Amino acid sequence: MFFYMPVHVYSEPYCITRHADALARLGKRALIVTGASSAKRNGSLQDTVQALEEKGVTWCLFDQVEENPSTDTVMKARDFGLSEQADFVIGIGGGSPMDAAKAIALMMQHPAEDASYMEDKEKDSGRLPLALIPTTCGTGSEVTAVSVLTRKATSHKSSIPHRIFADLAFLDGRYLQMASPSILANTTMDTFAHLVESYINTASTLYVRAIIDQGLSLWRKNKDIVLRQRQATEEDFFTMLNASMCGGMAIAHTGTTVPHGLSYALTLKANMPHGKACGYFMKGYLDEASKEDRNHILSLAGFKDTDDFLAYYRATCGMETIATDILESSIQDVLKTPAKLAAVPYTMNESVLRRIVF
Ligand SMILES: [Fe+2]
């Protein structure tokens, strides 16, 4: 068995401030990578800047990472970071800024290369020092080596082949307090998808399943918050972040499988948020699994059966009808990714995919 998770993680209130020394050791000038606004609103950018300035580290800001970030954006940020002579990268936000920050740190290390470098798995994955600060609770990207990017020319979204772990991750639940109920619903559904797809996975191991079990137990504690039956406390936000990190640590070892593979077309062609798009296929994925695996997951997550899960999904993420042609393209996407099919421990072919999708 194999287990490798090299990221130093700090998970506590004010952890960026408390561990500013660790952040400052990464370099002399930081390129901070964020989306347009949330890092400014939730206090994470301010804490980061304050910690850097207290340690005499200068910084510059690239705040143009879009949802489903493109390789074009990565190159634009890379050129900006080089022109600013930044020597390390800090990604703050949900999966989009964190995944972009990984690729930016890679490309800054290889300043003479063009965007094709990101796609070449034979090339060196060396990168600038990198810290990640999640401000949503679904991606787990702070502890994975994966950078999912969109290629605008082909409208295709998938991970680049380089494996890029961060040096540091700072988890502070206070930054989730600004997240809207729909963001919480979508991102926690992404966490659930990571945990399920990593458990029902040919690469799942004893170590990974120990983390998944812990993640599902944590995830269950937040269902009533996502259902808007209870207000979240600061402790609850940490529980959500820790569940998300468990999901991240799990998929860092197993990868995701069919629901994620099917989801990308819904996100790119129907504008459906990532977690909601993965959750769309989750009942079908669980229904096809072995009874033992299905019952284990459902009982830890606090669902009676997959219909109970579906009711939760509809209550939290909503349920909309997706056009048949988009669902067909989801199936074609997965059929073109043999690794996703091979990761499924039960029979997986086009007819099983059709049962999951329709
Ligand atoms: Fe995901």
Image (cartoon, rainbow, N blue to C red):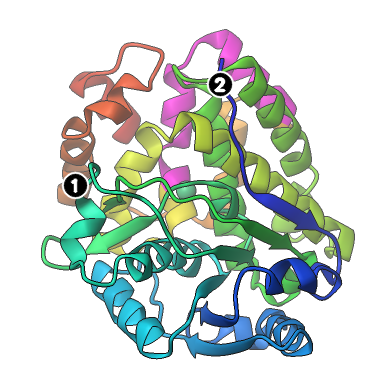
The stretch in magenta equals: 278-300
Residue picked out by circle 1: 324
Counting from the top left corner in percent of width and height, residue 271 is at 33, 65
Relative to 55, 131 lies left or right: left
Q: Nearer the viewer, mark 1 or mark 2?
A: 2
Counting from the top left corner in percent of width and height, residue 196 is at 55, 31
Kind of element beneath mark 2: loop
85 shown above or below 341: below
Q: Residue at x 66, y 85 (%)?
A: 57
Task: Determine which quarter of the picture holds residue 170.
Answer: bottom right
Task: Determine which quarter of the picture holds residue 296.
Answer: top right
Q: Residue at x 43, y 86 (%)?
A: 85
Q: Residue furthest left?
A: 153
147 shown above or below 89: above
Residue picked out by circle 2: 2
Report the front residue among 352 and 23: 23
Instruction: Determine if residue 233 is in view.
Output: no
Instruction: Determine if residue 167 is in view.
Output: yes
Specify which label sits upstream in the sequence, 1 or 2.
2
